[in-house]
Image (cartoon, rainbow, N blue to C red):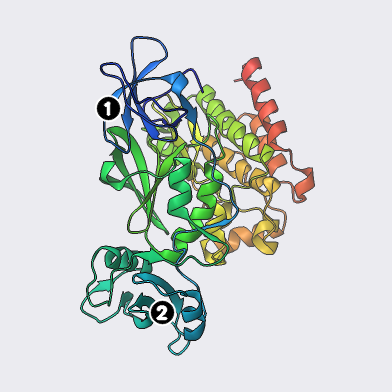
Amino acid sequence: MSKNLLPGMQCIARFDHTKPKPQELTFRKGDLITIVSACENKGWYQAHHHASGDVGIISGSALRERPPIKAKPQLSLMPWFHGAITGPQAVQELQPPKDGLFLVRESIRYPGDYVLCVCYGGEVIHYRIEYQDGTLSVDCSKKFSNLIDMIEYYSTCQGVLCSKLLNPKHKQGIKSAEEVLSKAGWLLSFQHLTLGKKIGEGEFGDVMQGEYLGCPVAIKNIKCDATAQNFLAETATMTKLQHKNLVTLKGVVLHNGLYLVMELLAKGNLVNYLRSRGRSIVPPQQLRFSLDVAEGMAYLEEKRLVHRDLAARNILLSENDDAKISDFGLSKSQLQLEDLSRLPIKWTAPEALHDKKFSSLSDVWSFGVLLWEVYSYGRSPYPKMSIKKAVEALKQGYRMESPENCPPVMYSLMRDCWMEEPEKRPTFKKIKEKLEKMLRESEF
């Protein structure tokens, strides 16, 4: 385990410790432990035990890092959802029938609606779930915004059903996200999460400031069933990544959808920072921001991961002005929705825009636009051009002019990033090396 454990870091207990000394935590192998603070005694920490709620001291040697989530088998927030199967097929899936065993399927007779199939008294009872005016309901007396909320409610309250929903029948080849996340130590408790003010807004959910076990965090809430499911796959990717220039995922809360709990970056996003401070930002800062982003992107490039939405708005700044890339695990899910109107067109490489060919080299194009943002103090790219005009201009070979007072060597790097043929653009590894050399030689 790492020698330096930081407040808010979550770890897994490596062994049982059932006979603690005074002030020590009691724990068993596999328990989830959150670091609260470092003790004066080196290698010891004040920590919180998730299951018991106790706070006590623990040796760092008793802890290990949480393992990343495996992509296969497929994880699902709704393992009980079987898709478009018929009534008889649902009955077959629910054999032998046991009170409270259930699944949800798409309605064959009423497209757009669902059917809740519940076992009771040796039979399978089918409840039509009507979708109307954006809500779901079994009997109109109780309405829900999504299936996850509905199943959660009827798991604790019988309501109009023949039985509480006690035992979900998992679709074959699907594993419960809740079970997998919990076992690996990535599932957090909603009761320990405090939601604060909204600090951001996206197409797929709000970003809020808050606390988890007293530690400041940023929280992204995705409520829509389908969107939350798409984000889940990319969340598994985020558990595999650790780099000083990537925003850290602390864990996931499953409650009325999906909450992603991430480290909170005190100074917000880079584009707002640039615009609010303008020319008080000095050249060494601009170079440092650029290098931080390049280092994070070189790490993603090495892992063969594509960001797809690299822009100054998706770079967050710490209290010490360290730049960290956000949404690096989520952009693929967003673009799977196949709505080109959602593409950040002025940041997107031509081959990605026209042929949907995304790669690390299309990210390099976006990085060139980000550099232009940094050196123009947060101006919107292609100023005074509509999106349509900018796209047409690029087809004719147009490239943005250098920002005022931008060092020629930096504008030259932007132009390299905007080469028409992806193979002629530098890799992030090369970009990082070039920026490191600039920093060493203090050209500015």
Residue that appears at 52% across and 81% down = 89
Q: Would residue 362 appear left or right of 338 to someone viewing this image? A: right
**Residue 137's x, y, as percent?**
29, 77
144 is higher (above) or lower (below) than 416: below
The C terminus lies in quadrant: top right
**Amino acid type at image mark 1:** Val
CA–CA distance between discs 2 and 1?
Answer: 45 Å
Depth check, mark 2 against mark 1: the one in front is 1
Amino acid type at circle 2 is Tyr
| SS for callout 1 | strand
Instruction: Identify which residue is drawn at 50% across, 25% down.
Output: 285
Residue 210 sits in which quadrant? top left
Q: Which residue is mark 1?
A: 55
Label pair 2/1, CB-CB below 8 angstroms: no
Q: State the residue at coordinates (59%, 51%).
A: 71
Residue 416, placed above or below residue 156 = above
Question: Which numbered disc flags the more N-terminal residue, 2 or 1?
Answer: 1
Q: Is residue 219 visible?
A: yes
Q: Nearer the viewer, residue 341 or 181?
A: 181
Which mark is drawn over residue 114?
A: 2
The x, y position of residue 109, in whole percent, is 45, 90
- Determine whether, in the image, residue 207 is placed left or right of residue 388: left
Numbered badge on residue 138: none
Compared to residue 211, the image places residue 35 above or below, namely: above
SS class of the residue under badge 2? Answer: strand
Q: Position of residue 192 (x, y in %)?
A: 27, 41
Q: Is residue 388 left or right of residue 24?
A: right
Across and down, in percent, residue 226 comes to 46, 65
Label 1: few (<14), some or many (≥20) within 10 Å?
A: some
- Foreground pick, 344 / 133: 133
Neighbor class of circle 2 (other Cα within 10 Å; few <14, some 14-19, many 20+) is many
